[in-house]
Amino acid sequence: MSTADRPAGPTTAASDVAAACRDADFVRLVATADGDALAATGVLARALDATDRPFQASVVAPAADTTRETEADLTVTIGHATATADRSIERGATPLSEIANAAARELAGTGDPVLALAGATTAPATPSGDLLEGATEAGAVQQPGVAIPTGNVADGLAHSTLVHAPFSGDADRTDEVLRELGVPESADELGADDRRRLASTVAIRTVKPESATARGAERVERALRPHALDGPFATVEGYGDVLDAVAREQPGTGVALALGHDTREAALSAWRTHGDRAHRALRSATTGRYDGLFVARGGVEDLGVSDVRDVPVGTVARLLGDFRSPEPVALFVTDGRAAATATDGRDLATTMEAAAAAVDGRAGATSHGAQATFETDTSDLIMAFREAL
């Protein structure tokens, strides 16, 4: 199918994406590296597979160049728009994965509401009641407790990036919390009272530290009263946490997971690594407060990694904004990379683009803000960002 036969330009309309996919012989799906976009890719890819349409799926970093030679006659970008895309599912008031689920239903007659809801739980946008109902009909059951992907409670709490508490990233402290509560480590052995006490303890310990913010009391709610799931992960929200981590940590594994391949253990390993690095980076960072902006800076040598690309800047910035920043904009900067997030709803893409341009860097939008890569000193990027803000 020739791209000249259809109008170019991005659209978020599920029906338009479905129609374009229906007419295509080979579809290329290009997702931004986050859980919502990855889940959306998986939902669409499964619908394409169900209708015997060849496809190629990939995940790209926010500041990466998505231009690529391909034999696909339809390119759909998910989470971002480019001049070379034929269709785009862009961010807005509806999660990307929910739009993709609607497109999949039109294309194949059915979607994957559980995978879509898992992705939607990682997005700033709120999933609709229809998606929640669809996931419930597919077997997701809301219950008291804490959102974790594994059957081991200590493992789930220690590596979760849904909260940032004193025990986060610290398996020993997590074990201590469970011993103090007197609850079993196996999620299957938790009774309703155990789940409620665990949820209360996680909430209290998340907002109790002196460095915690009022926003943290609101954001911790996304980790409570999860939807239990009978595979591949213990809860829908925990599934989303894994999707978000693996999209950023190991994109290839993330694509395989979203497509339904048996990569659970590899995905959980990437999730643990991602969570450990994010919490360590946030704890070891030095901070500075400005009017409207809270900055955290961490050097690679302080984070236990040898490559700056291993620093999960996007997740650190999100955790900083949700649980530690007293200002509406939070910026995390390390050697050659930066990420920013806003808690007041503003779009930071233009701000980060201006800051990156000022230091000859490159920027891109993300689910929770924007990221940049650069080659100057971190202080130059911070200054440029402050001026652009």
Image: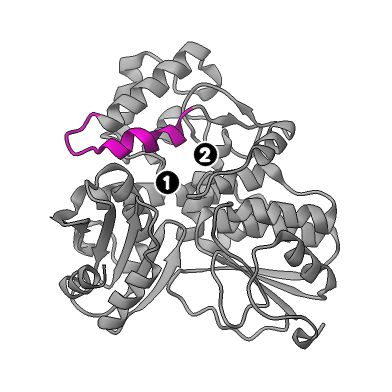
- In the rendered view, tell whether residue 364 sits above or below residue 166: below
**What amino acid type is highlighted by mark number 1?**
Arg
Rendering quarter of residue 62: bottom left
Secondary structure under tag 1 reads helix
The stretch in magenta equals: 208-224
Relative side of 210 to 233, left or right: left
**Total numbered circles:** 2
Check the image and tell me how it is coloured: one colour
Is residue 97 shown to the viewer in this render?
yes
Check disc 2 and report the residue beneath it. 238
The residue depicted at 75 percent of the width and 66 percent of the height is: 16
Residue 347 in the image, given as x and y percentages of width and height: 40, 62
Check disc 1 and report the residue beneath it. 272
User: Badges 2 and 1: C-beta atoms under 8 Å apart?
Assistant: no
Instruction: Judge by depth and name the residue closer to the eye, 24 or 167.
Output: 24
Q: CA distance from mark 2 to mark 1?
A: 12 Å
Relative side of 194 to 77, left or right: left
The residue depicted at 72 percent of the width and 84 percent of the height is: 71
The residue depicted at 27 percent of the width and 55 percent of the height is: 330
The residue depicted at 35 percent of the width and 51 percent of the height is: 344
Residue 171 in the image, given as x and y percentages of width and height: 33, 35
Q: Residues within 10 Å of mark 1 (few under 14, many from 20)?
A: many
Tell me, yes or no, whether the highlighted magenta stretch contains residue 366. no
Q: Quadrant of the N terminus?
A: bottom right
Which label sits on residue 371? none
Rendering quarter of residue 337: bottom left
Residue 223 in the image, given as x and y percentages of width and height: 45, 34
Q: Residues within 10 Å of mark 2 (few under 14, many from 20)?
A: many
Instruction: Judge by depth and name the residue closer to the eye, 28 or 303.
Output: 28
Secondary structure under tag 2 reads helix
